[in-house]
Image: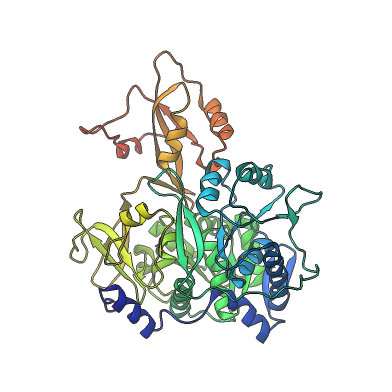
Amino acid sequence: MSAPAPTTKSDREAYHRDHGYWTSERLGWWVFDVAERTPDREFLVIGDLRLTYGEFAAWADVLAANLVEAGVVRGDRVLIQLPNLAEALVGQVAAFRIGAVNVPVVPIYREHEMAHIVYDCKPRAVISIAENRGRRPADELDGILDGASWGPVARFCVDMDEPRPGWRPFPRRDDPRPPVSLPDPLEPEKCSLMLYTSGTTAAPKGVQLSGRGFVSNARSIRHTMSLSAKDVFFCASPLSHLAGFSAGIVWPASVGAKIVVMPTWNGAEAARIIERERCTFTTAASVFLHDLIAAHREGIGTGHPITVFMSGGASTAPDLIREASEVGITALRGYGMTETGGGVSWVAPTEPLDIRAEYDGAVIPGSEIQAVDSERRLLPPGEEGELRIRGPQALMSYTDPSLTREQMDEGGWFYTGDLGRVDDHGRVRVTGRTKDIINRAGEKFSARDIEELIQRHPAVEMAAVVGLPDERLGEVVGAFVTLAEGHEWPGAAEMAVYLDEAKLAKQKIPISWQVLPQLPMTASGKIQKHGLRNYKRS
């Protein structure tokens, strides 16, 4: 276990610099530096597309010049909502290169979520796609941006087959580069990335993260996992999600390694791709590990299973880690979240199977994790309490100052809302959570957000939404309702249509519904959700 960092802010910052957790490196240079040294080294494989570092950097340079020509300046926010395409990575790297703030947003979000995000971050440029899985995200953004007084100055659309008012086609690799000079990437201490995550509040929360935090995170993962340019990273998580961003850009670029990205998830196909490309490392939610194990048990991709799989983002059953070992995968559990810039506890793949299966990692050097009681007093090792975290990669703040005050204290501690234990070796075991969120395959949804929409239906008096256990996804959305006087239950199908028409992300629509005469309440009038989770799924 590492020695605790100093307690004052200035002393902690000096400690991080003196011990190499904070450096002068800038995210905006990483890909370009590797491209300059080894332009022919393969960087990205996605579908049938293969790009070297040199080819990728040249493409990102063209987009960066287009952004600057359009009027984007250092510190402006570039919102990117794309599925797993090469353009998603090109957009993020280009934003970093010109000192813009990268704002990647998961593609499942629709108008309901996107309206809040857009008006919270006020992007000066947006990058979207004409069509994605039956939706038209660029059109959706047009509806949200109509009348916005602050811009944006440019909108870039991928796969724009016909002219679209107000939009430019996303530059192709062979497009001419506008003759403009590019500003330098942002300084390490500046906010370079904004991610939106759901928590106890209804709307997604904007998390501001510094470039030096991600450099610190990459340093830790390289050291613990012994990663190098010889590794081949595999990424099936959304590139706009923290796991996809880290495994798709930050970690491979930090060592000059190759990344293999999967556009859409399929366990059997993933096993084949991993075998073909000889992939060595990935991080993802436990559902991906579950599906890879199933594929290998059917004899698919057994010639080369993924070497190391770090499971995080959702609870991982110890038995799943053991089952992975049976098919040749060295799996381990990790713990972290968007607010901590990625994992802050994990164990080396060389650790014994029981340690990898039973613990959510060990706190990484430079960071601290503690369990505290309801008064935020430190608990003895091994006692259960709320987990709090501080370290060189933690968030700078939320975009909402009130949320920052609520979840961060003057000592620099971030209060996670998760329950757990920390033993005297610094090993962490997460036991539950205090936050009212649902964790479906690593995507976290606010229960309150869904409840508020359900309760707008005229037939519903009250609603409670909970995460129901699911063997594959970890949790799925379940809803419990009471009916308004004089109304009959319209049925699960009609309710699903109602939520879909409200533009709620489809993954948030409950798959299980229960109509109750009344919801279980505490004496103070709060719904007792722990009892609802024991109901059988309808």
Residue 465 point in image, percent of width and height: 40, 37
Q: Quadrant of residue 520?
A: top left
Position of the C terminus, as image quadrant, is: top left
Of residue 118 and residue 112, the one placed in the foreground of this image is 118
Q: How is the image coloured?
A: rainbow
Residue 237 shows in this picture: no
Q: How many marks?
A: 0
Position of the N terminus, as image quadrant, is: bottom left
Residue drawn at x 55%, y 66% is 75
Residue drawn at x 39%, y 75% is 351
Residue 82 point in image, percent of width and height: 64, 55
Of residue 391 and residue 521, the one placed in the foreground of this image is 391
Tell me if residue 8 comes above or below residue 283 in the rendering: below
Residue drawn at x 81%, y 51% is 161
Residue 442 point in image, percent of width and height: 47, 54
Residue situated furthest top in the rendering:
486
Residue 128 shows in this picture: yes
Residue situated furthest front in the rendering:
149
Q: Is residue 364 left or right of residue 114?
A: left
Of residue 43 and residue 392, the one placed in the foreground of this image is 392
Residue 486 point in image, percent of width and height: 42, 13
Tell me if residue 275 comes above or below residue 10 in the rendering: above
Residue drawn at x 69%, y 80% is 41
